Image (cartoon, grey):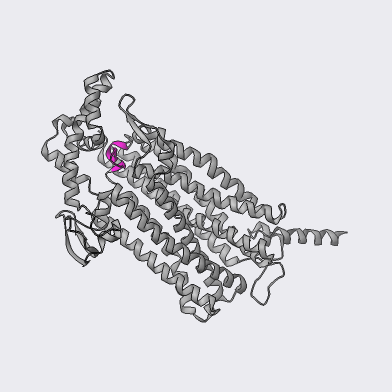
């Protein structure tokens, strides 16, 4: 049996690397789409200022993209090193979208981002615009395939368990791709990235407006970002509602935990606006409720029953008892795959196989036939995730979403009235808003992943079975190493971003009335990361003419 401490450390290591990596992903997703919109305006209007804007925000995208790649590469290896049983159990399904993501999306995005940055003087306007759109498409396709893989873990579709090979096998690629959870989560996550980029662009633009620098670029960027942000935030909130609707059917325990709903309430159920869950006593120490609101929020009806945590736990205890014969039959089939009686017994209890695995953790010698009622009760309690953490993390995320929506609404109003500079307090607030979408994205990830526990693959494979059998010392060493390394990456990201922002956008005609400045040296435009090859070429030509 795998040591519980090793399982816990494996979870902490993957969670820490994923949370670090997810600081970079949303900004990349959003900035690529924002750049495509900026460059479209440039191509349509022909105004050079939009080219300058595209190049400047593209520089910040490149910094974020590079660090995002560095933090993301190790995660796929972790499945093999720290989650070997999981990789063997679902590798046929999980590996397919990850392989497609690497071959189709990641390499396309990486190639096109190079052409986008260095192709301004080598491609026509239309060609370069297509390249920028391909960067946006590649980044979003990358997110799609990652979330298809994650969607299988949340709601396994398109696969069947083979009791002979003891593995999950893909039987419907379309069901895997078009899983309701995967598709809703993809759109929700992508649009959350657009919100992140909008806040980031608005915050940096506010910095320039406060400093009276690069005013024309800052004003235009701020306006586009806030309009982009309003639409994106509305989309995030709407898709969040869709995910809640899907989750109410696919993962009732997660939904009940998100709402701290212990008892099954008569319909329409009340909504716990604020509560203090006590998992030990399986009740809320206190709760502020809004009557009749939860049922229409989750089910979009007034009379659909929403099961409470206690009812779910009791139902899962029954499923655990029903899953025990499936596990026993599986052992017989591993010894004799042609045992017809064992196969018949397995087929009769197959849908609860995962619940049988859950109780093996507590059964003597992991022999489920020896499991007692007390063992089954412990396993049933395990099927309920950490209610307190999920309840409050979810609410923090929702509060951040509505805060960002309010910020964008005021930003659009001030910007369209051309009076944003008259509100320095609001501009300073915009700077403080920059971390908010990143925190909201992290809260969303925690809600989704912590709420899935105790499963690695929901209803099929428990987390305690999925980890590799490493030593505690090895896991502590690797955890400390990863956290230290990723912290260095974050520091590098912050340093490069701050330096690039302080340097500011480049403009072709020196400092103008709008406050747009430009370093006219070759090093200032290209080597320092300004990405102004036109200006570099002019400088070289000027030096050549002087020599002649």
The reply, left or right, for residue 125 in relation to residue 330 is right
The quarter of the image holding the C terminus is bottom right
Residue 56 is drawn in which quadrant? bottom right
Most foreground residue, 482 or 185: 185
In this view, which residue lies farthest toward the right? 548
The residue located at (85%, 60%) in the rendering is 545
Residue 102 x, y percent position in the rendering: 51, 41
Quadrant placement of the N terminus: top left
Residue depicted at 64% across the width and 65% down the height: 50
Please report the residue visible at 22 percent of the width from the left and 23 percent of the height from the top: 342
Residue 513, percent across and down?
Answer: 67, 77
Residue 331 spot, x, y in % from top left = 24, 25
**As drawn, is 548 to the left or to the right of 160?**
right
Residue 298 in the image, given as x and y percentages of width and height:
29, 57
Visible in this render: residue 196?
Answer: yes
Does the stretch in magenta take in 19? no
Q: Residue at x 35, y 39 (%)?
A: 474
Asked whether residue 443 is in view, the answer is no
Q: How many callouts does the rendering have? A: 0
Looking at the image, residue 32 lies above or below residue 2:
below
Vertical relation: 521 (above or below) 18: below
Tell me the magenta residue range: 455-466
């Amino acid at each position: 049996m795998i040591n519980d401490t090793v399982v816990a450390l494996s979870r902490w290591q993957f969670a820490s690397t994923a949370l670090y990596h997810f600081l970079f992903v949303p900004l990349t997703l959003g900035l690529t789409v924002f750049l495509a919109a900026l460059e479209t305006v440039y191509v349509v209007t022909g105004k050079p200022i939009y080219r300058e804007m595209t190049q400047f925000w593209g520089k910040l995208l490149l910094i974020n993209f590079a660090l995002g790649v560095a933090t993301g590469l190790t995660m796929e290896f972790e499945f093999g090193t720290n989650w070997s049983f999981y990789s063997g159990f679902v590798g046929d399904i999980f590996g397919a979208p990850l392989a497609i993501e690497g071959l189709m999306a990641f390499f396309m995005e990486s190639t096109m981002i190079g052409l986008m940055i260095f192709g301004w003087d080598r491609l026509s306007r239309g060609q370069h615009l297509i390249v920028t759109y391909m960067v946006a498409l590649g980044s979003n396709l990358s997110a799609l395939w990652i979330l298809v893989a994650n969607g299988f873990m949340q709601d396994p579709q398109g696969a069947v368990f083979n009791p002979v090979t003891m593995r999950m096998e893909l039987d419907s690629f379309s069901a895997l791709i078009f899983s309701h959870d995967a598709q809703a989560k993809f759109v929700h996550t992508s649009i959350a990235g657009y919100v992140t980029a909008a806040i980031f662009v608005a915050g940096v633009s506010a910095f320039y407006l406060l400093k009276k620098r690069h005013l024309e670029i800052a004003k235009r960027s701020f306006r586009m970002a806030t309009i982009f942000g309003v639409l994106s935030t509305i989309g995030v909130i709407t898709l969040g509602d869709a995910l809640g609707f899907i989750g109410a059917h696919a993962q009732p325990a997660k939904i009940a935990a998100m709402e701290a709903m212990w008892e099954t309430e008569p319909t329409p159920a009340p909504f716990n606006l604020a509560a203090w869950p006590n998992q030990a006593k399986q009740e809320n120490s206190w709760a502020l409720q809004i009557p009749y609101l939860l049922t229409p929020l989750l089910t979009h009806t007034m009379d659909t029953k929403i099961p409470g945590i206690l009812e779910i736990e009791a139902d899962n205890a029954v499923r655990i008892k029903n899953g025990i014969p499936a596990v026993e039959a599986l052992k017989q089939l591993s010894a004799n795959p042609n045992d017809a009686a064992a196969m018949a017994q397995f087929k009769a209890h197959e849908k609860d196989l995962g619940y049988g695995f859950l109780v093996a953790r507590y059964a003597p010698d992991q022999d489920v036939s020896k499991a007692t009622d007390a063992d089954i009760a412990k396993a049933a309690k395990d099927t309920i995730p950490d209610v307190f953490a999920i309840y409050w993390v979810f609410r923090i995320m929702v509060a951040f979403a509505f805060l960002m929506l309010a910020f964008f609404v005021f930003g659009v109003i001030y910007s369209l009235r051309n009076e944003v500079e008259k509100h320095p307090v609001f501009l300073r607030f915009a700077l403080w808003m920059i971390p908010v979408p990143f925190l909201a994205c992290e809260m969303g990830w925690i809600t989704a992943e912590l709420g899935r526990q105790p499963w690695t693959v929901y209803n099929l494979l428990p987390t305690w079975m999925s980890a590799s059998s490493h030593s505690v010392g090895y896991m502590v060493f690797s955890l400390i190493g990863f956290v230290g390394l990723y912290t260095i990456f974050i520091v590098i990201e912050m340093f490069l971003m701050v330096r690039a922002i302080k340097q500011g956008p480049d403009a072709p005609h020196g400092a103008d009335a709008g406050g747009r400045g430009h370093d006219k040296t070759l090093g200032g435009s290209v080597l320092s990361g300004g990405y102004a090859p036109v200006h570099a070429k002019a400088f070289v030509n000027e030096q050549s003419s002087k020599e002649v």
